[in-house]
Image: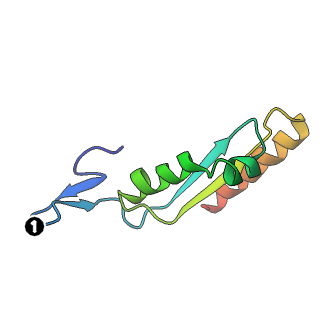
Amino acid sequence: MFRPDFAMKKVAGPRTWKPGLKEKSARIVVTMGMPALVYRWYFGAHSLKSLERNILGFCGIGPIRESLVGMVDGPARRRERWLMRMRELGRRGL
């Protein structure tokens, strides 16, 4: 998807590249075994921020939304609620 002339367009001038995915949006879904709050607060969600800024944002994608799902090894009932939530977000285009 991030090939030249798709994600980034070559242009003449001082800025030789222009973002090619403006007006596109993204949702990043991160699942993990630890609580999502710990990932965000203690670890600073550094890999998530890096993906948003250095790849998606660089190509012009925005807005970028995120869903952090922690404790995925928990009860199946909770997993089903998360899956339903993700389906609903996808259905609504959020």
Which residue does the numbered mark 1 point to in the structure image? 13
Among the 4 quarters of the image, the one containing residue 76: top right
Taking the view exactly as shown, the residue that stands out farthest to the left is 12
- Describe residue 77's horizontal placement relative to residue 20 as left or right: right
Residue found at x 69% / y 47% = 39
Taking the view exactly as shown, the residue that stands out farthest to the front is 42
Q: Position of residue 2 (x, y in %)?
A: 33, 45
Instruction: Examine the rendering and report whether any part of residue 85 can be seen.
Output: yes
Residue found at x 9% / y 64% = 12
Q: Categorize mark 1 by other alpha carbons within 10 Å: few (<14), some (14-19), many (20+).
A: few
Q: Quadrant of the C terminus?
A: bottom right
Q: Identify which amino acid the numbered label 1 is placed on.
A: Gly
- Describe residue 12's horizontal placement relative to residue 54 as left or right: left
- The image shows a total of numbered marks equal to 1
Q: Quadrant of the N terminus?
A: top left
The image shows residue 26, relative to residue 80, as above or below, that is below
Q: Position of residue 89 (x, y in %)?
A: 68, 57
Taking the view exactly as shown, the residue that stands out farthest to the top is 73
Residue found at x 15% / y 60% = 16
Colouring mode (rainbow / by chain / secondary structure / one colour): rainbow
Determine the secondary structure under disc 1: loop
Q: Position of residue 28 (x, y in %)?
A: 58, 50
Instruction: Examine the rendering and report whether any part of residue 90 can be seen.
Output: no
The image shows residue 31, relative to residue 25, as above or below, that is above
Residue found at x 26% / y 54% = 8
Q: Position of residue 66 (x, y in %)?
A: 62, 56
